[in-house]
Image: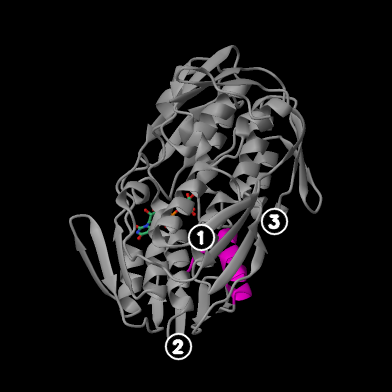
Amino acid sequence: MEKFIVEGGKRLTGTVRVSGSKNSALGILVAAALADGECLLHNVPDETDIRIMIDILIELGVRVEWLEANTLRLRTAHLRSYQAPYELVRRMRASFYVAGLLLARVGKAEVPLPGGCSLGSRPVDFHLKGFQALGADVSISHGLMKAEATRLIGTKIYINRSSVGTTVNLMLAASLAEGQTILENAAKEPEVVDLAIFLNGMGARIKGAGTNVIKIDGVKKLSGTEYTIIPDRVEAGTLMIATACTRGDVVVEEVVPEHLRAVVLTLQEAGVTVEEDLTRFHVVSDRRPKAVDTETAPYPGFPTDLQQPFVALMSTADGTSIIRETIFDRFRYVDELRRMGADIKVERDTAIVRGVERLTGAPVEVTDLRAGAALLCAALGAEGATEMVGVEHIDRGYERIDQKLRALGARITRFHAEGEWPSQE
Ligand code: UD1
């Protein structure tokens, strides 16, 4: 168990650089294993989820090396196994992407189904239907998916609900299929576009990524390439919200402003000043935010991954905000925010947040990645000390977040179970 002690109430100031996108890197790492040859990936965030994916790929026979802090080299002569290891797969839902890889490259896949997690049940039925449509023989038994296809055959697939994971998995599978695959109602997230650009750099023929119809003309072989992963829009948004929570003044650099349009507009509506140039946001807040209503939606809507930090911000807003979550069951962290004095009522998919003057530090427990981000934002703005346990959830998807925040003036200390965690600065 790792924990943070956050002494709240310090205004964040300065400049912070955003790391590469975790969600993009997860798909791209798996895609790199489709290549006959070497891929060099830059701006890969060094986070637990990325390390898990690397370990899975190594188990399957991919040679993976860190060349520098955020640069990876992947080489795949052949995959030596079609069975993904349960112990690693169960730790992360995105590990199901190896199903698309294995089917495309080996024609056979055995991948444990991702279990339920603290976000509730997260099914993979769309992924399975897609593999079947591509001609794979798919069966499920005792929580294990077995799929087989001599060669996948391109076809038209309608994805029932805009799903990032399904779109990614089917793009991976269809890239080496015979003929054309058309994904209808595909996810439009920037991470899907990033994957398409990377795959095309490997020789794939993908058009339409970023719209809801993606056309993939299967090719016989993909080759190695070099690529730089896009900045993490969720980390950027979290840092912007953290700045607003502390009434701070921060330049968030290495961002693609277009990827955060809904977030910027919502923050501005709350009275936060956000100015931008090509790759930076300047965020300034000097007063209590105004209450704003919003609801999460697939891109370009307000991201579900920022719903929790935004609720933390609205907890001290002037007025009552209504926040609706339309993608996942994601309000369990609210109990922890209440320990800090937040006044939040949850009715099914909606949080009714009555802003209080200020939050106060309290012992809280992090139960998932984005809940952790929310509690961290709340703790930074709160009066007094917050002890956060379960910080390893935050490390899954935020690279050196405590170091970055300390550099902005936050008082945050990391403790290991036995004592203070050695600083890596
Ligand atoms: C990805 C992101 C996650 C983000 C989410 C929504 C990664 C690694 N994770 O998750 O950070 O919060 O997109 O933007 O990129 N669904 C089904 N059946 C399926 C697949 C999905 O019912 O087979 C449902 C889900 O339960 C959810 C919705 O579709 O309600 C969207 O899920 P999806 O976009 O697939 O999320 P992930 O890819 O898991």
Which mark lies nearer to you, 2 or 1?
1
The residue labelled by disc 1 is 63
Where residue 4 appears, as percent x and y from the top left, is 54, 22
Marked residue nearer the N-terminal end (2 or 1): 1
Q: Quadrant of the C terminus?
A: top right
Residue 262 left/right relative to 336: right
In the rendered image, which quarter is residue 28 located in? bottom right
Q: Which amino acid does label 3 sit on?
A: Glu
Q: Residue at x 56, y 72 (%)?
A: 37
Using the rendered image of the protein, determine whether residue 289 is visible from the camera's viewpoint: no
89, 66: nearer the viewer:
66
Instruction: Point out residue 97 in the picture as x, y percentages from the top left corner.
Output: 42, 61
- Which residue is located at x 26 percent, y 62 percent? 145
Q: What stretch is highlighted in magenta?
A: 185-202
Q: Do the residues labelled 1 and 3 touch (CB within 8 Å)?
A: no
Left or right: 298 as drawn, with respect to 125 = right
Is 199 magenta? The answer is yes
**Which residue is identified by label 2?**
179
Q: Position of residue 279 (x, y in %)?
A: 77, 51
Residue underneath mark 3: 258
Q: Where does residue 180 sit, x and y in percent of width and height?
A: 46, 85
Q: Is residue 44 magenta?
A: no
Frontmost of labels 1 and 3 is 1
Camera-side residue of 56 and 192: 56
Mark 1 and mark 3 lie on one chain; the one further toward the N terminus is 1
Asked if labels 3 and 2 touch by Cβ distance under 8 angstroms, the answer is no
